[in-house]
């Protein structure tokens, strides 16, 4: 199946590692031109080299100035065809231990960062060819995980953002969808497993094995398995899809909807 990505211009926020990087790799293989954004210039440079070349945009999307940095980073493209926002994450904590600052920081990381990136890049997307936005949500938006109340709330907000904004963006010719991963083996999880292993005196493998038990497919996902859906949703093959959130989660979210 030809995804029609040859020569299309794609900006991936959170493209330096994990699911964002796997998405960049697949898009580069399909002939897309890439721009990668994240905080670390070093990680970005490595990622750009690994995929055979890309623009790099060091910026922190939890800061208001990030919008201008993203727009400046694609200067000269005269239009953007694909925007993927792959930053985000959870805090594992009991509700009683979460401060206002924790809630605020998690909201900025998971929700406001997406709002800012999309708003700043709307004019460029409107000038793009068959423009599409794909954001990364989480399976927890449909099946909240224990001890992750802040991100459960904020990722559920992305379901509403996707559905609400898709209507408004359709009027501007832009499709807008969301991919909701389950547990996926990226630095987000390898770092968490290392921390829990040190705190609990057991191996990282034992931590990961425990978290695999309630996944029907009995294993973590690989970043490429999630990225494949992101790339497809961003492609012209998904031309009649907008406002949808699709889980790629090994079956962990057991709700009917
Ligand atoms: N992995 C999972 O199990 C899982 C499960 C459910 C949902 N998800 C969602 O899937 C998405 C991708 O997850 P992942 O596992 O690939 O995450 P990850 O390994 O933590 O990667 C996050 C990416 O975002 C960048 N980033 C982090 N903070 C940033 C900031 N403030 N400004 C700009 N860039 C920033 C990071 O690079 P820098 O460090 O250079 O900034 C990195 O490129 C997230 O939305 C996550 O919530 C993942």
Image (tube, helix red, strand yellow):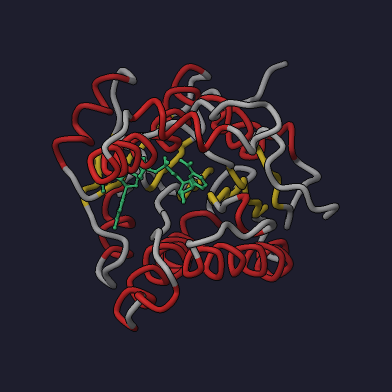
Task: Residue lying at the far bottom in this picture: please name it.
Answer: 100
Say above or below: 63 vs 19: below
Say above or below: 97 vs 38: below
Task: Residue lying at the far right in this picture: please name it.
Answer: 256
Label total for image: 0
Q: Nearer the viewer, residue 213 or 182?
A: 213
**Going 33% across and 36% down the picture, which residue do you hit?**
187
Q: Nearer the viewer, residue 247 or 240?
A: 247
Quadrant of the snapshot with the N terminus: top right
Quadrant of the snapshot with the C terminus: bottom right
**Going 66% across and 51% down the picture, which residue do you hit?**
177
Q: Residue 185: horizontal and vertical position, in percent?
A: 44, 31
Q: Residue 40: horizontal and vertical position, in percent?
A: 18, 44
Q: Residue 93: horizontal and vertical position, in percent?
A: 39, 64
On the rendered structure, is 255 left or right of 166?
A: right
**Going 47% across and 69% down the picture, which residue do you hit?**
150
**Going 55% across and 62% down the picture, which residue do you hit?**
155
On the rendered structure, is 60 left or right of 92?
A: left
Q: Quadrant of residue 159?
A: bottom right
Task: Residue lying at the far front in this picture: please name it.
Answer: 201
Q: Nearer the viewer, residue 246 or 196?
A: 196
Q: Quadrant of residue 238?
A: top right
Say above or below: 205 vs 153: above
């Amino acid at each position: 199946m030809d995804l029609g990505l040859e020569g299309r211009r794609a900006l991936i926020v959170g493209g330096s590692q994990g699911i964002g990087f796997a998405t960049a790799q697949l898009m580069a293989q399909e002939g897309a031109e890439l721009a990668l954004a994240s905080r670390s210039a070093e990680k970005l440079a490595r990622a750009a080299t690994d995929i055979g070349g890309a623009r790099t945009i060091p910026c922190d999307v939890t800061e208001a100035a990030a919008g201008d940095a993203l727009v400046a980073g694609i200067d000269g493209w005269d239009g953007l065809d694909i925007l993927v926002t792959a930053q985000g994450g959870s805090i594992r904590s009991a509700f009683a231990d979460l401060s206002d600052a924790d809630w605020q920081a998690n909201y900025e990381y998971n929700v406001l960062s997406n709002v800012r990136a999309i708003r700043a890049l709307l004019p460029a997307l409107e000038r793009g060819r068959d423009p599409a936005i794909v954001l990364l949500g989480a399976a927890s938006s449909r099946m909240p995980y224990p001890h992750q109340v802040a991100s459960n709330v904020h990722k559920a907000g992305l379901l509403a953002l996707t559905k609400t904004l898709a209507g408004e963006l359709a009027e501007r010719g832009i499709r807008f969808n969301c991919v909701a991963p389950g547990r996926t083996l990226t630095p987000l999880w390898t770092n968490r497993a290392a921390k829990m292993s040190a705190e609990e005196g057991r191996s990282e493998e034992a931590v990961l094995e425990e978290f695999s038990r309630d996944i029907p497919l009995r294993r973590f996902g690989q970043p490429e398995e999630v990225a494949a859906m992101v790339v497809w949703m961003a492609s012209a093959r998904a031309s009649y899809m907008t406002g949808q959130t699709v889980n790629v989660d090994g079956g962990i979210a057991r709700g009917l909807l």
